[in-house]
Image (cartoon, rainbow, N blue to C red):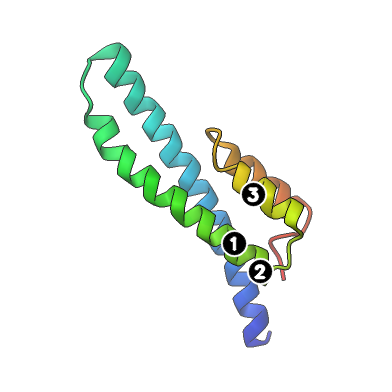
Amino acid sequence: MTASTATVTGIGRLFRAVAIAEACSWAGLLVGMFFKYVVVRNDIGVTIFGPIHGALFVLYCVVALVAWRMLRWDLKTLALALVSSIPPLMTIWFERRAAARGQLAG
């Protein structure tokens, strides 16, 4: 395995990890919002998960751009990856779709 192949494989793994983490932070934020607005009227969950989700959202978008460049995705795949970051838990769907199509491997 050459250095460039290892880097490309690493980008695919990084993308998968960040996509899953972003989805989990979305879930945490949704639970925090449920408790804030429905159950206890306490914003501790939003206070904790809001910044975490924000950071992971930005990281996901950056890693998607790097993956687009290094894994040679077409613009349609990049657009789908970026749009998938908006609805809750869609990054997992996109990650699984890209893995099934071989778009996360070098």
Query: How packed is label 2: few (under 14 Cα within 10 Å), some, or many (20 or more)?
Result: few
Q: Quadrant of the C terminus?
A: bottom right
Distance, label 3 to label 2, CA atoms, is 13 Å
Report the residue at 72% width, 46% height from top.
97
Report the residue at 62% width, 64% height from top.
67
Left or right? Give the position of 58 relative to 66: left
Distance, label 1 to label 2, CA atoms, is 6 Å
Left or right? Give the position of 24 relative to 70: left
Task: First in sequence, mark 3 or 1: give its number.
Answer: 1
Q: Which corner quadrant of the image does residue 65 belong to?
A: bottom right
CB atoms at circles 1 and 2 under 8 Å apart? yes
Question: Which residue in the structure is indicated by mark 1?
Answer: 65
Report the residue at 35% width, 19% height from top.
34
| Residue in front for this viewpoint, 56 or 92 | 56
Q: Position of residue 9 (x, y in %)?
A: 64, 71
Q: Position of residue 28 (x, y in %)?
A: 38, 34
Q: Quadrant of the N terminus?
A: bottom right
Query: How packed is label 3: few (under 14 Cα within 10 Å), some, or many (20 or more)?
Result: many
Amino acid type, mark 3: Ala
- Label 1, secondary structure: give it: helix
Q: Which corner quadrant of the image does residue 48 belong to?
A: top left
Q: Position of residue 43 (x, y in %)?
A: 23, 26
- Label 3, secondary structure: give it: helix
- Label 2, secondary structure: give it: helix
Residue 99's tag is none
Distance, label 3 to label 1, CA atoms, is 9 Å
Q: Position of residue 3 (x, y in %)?
A: 62, 86
Residue 69's tag is 2
Question: Which residue in the structure is indicated by mark 3?
Answer: 81
CB atoms at circles 3 and 1 under 8 Å apart? no
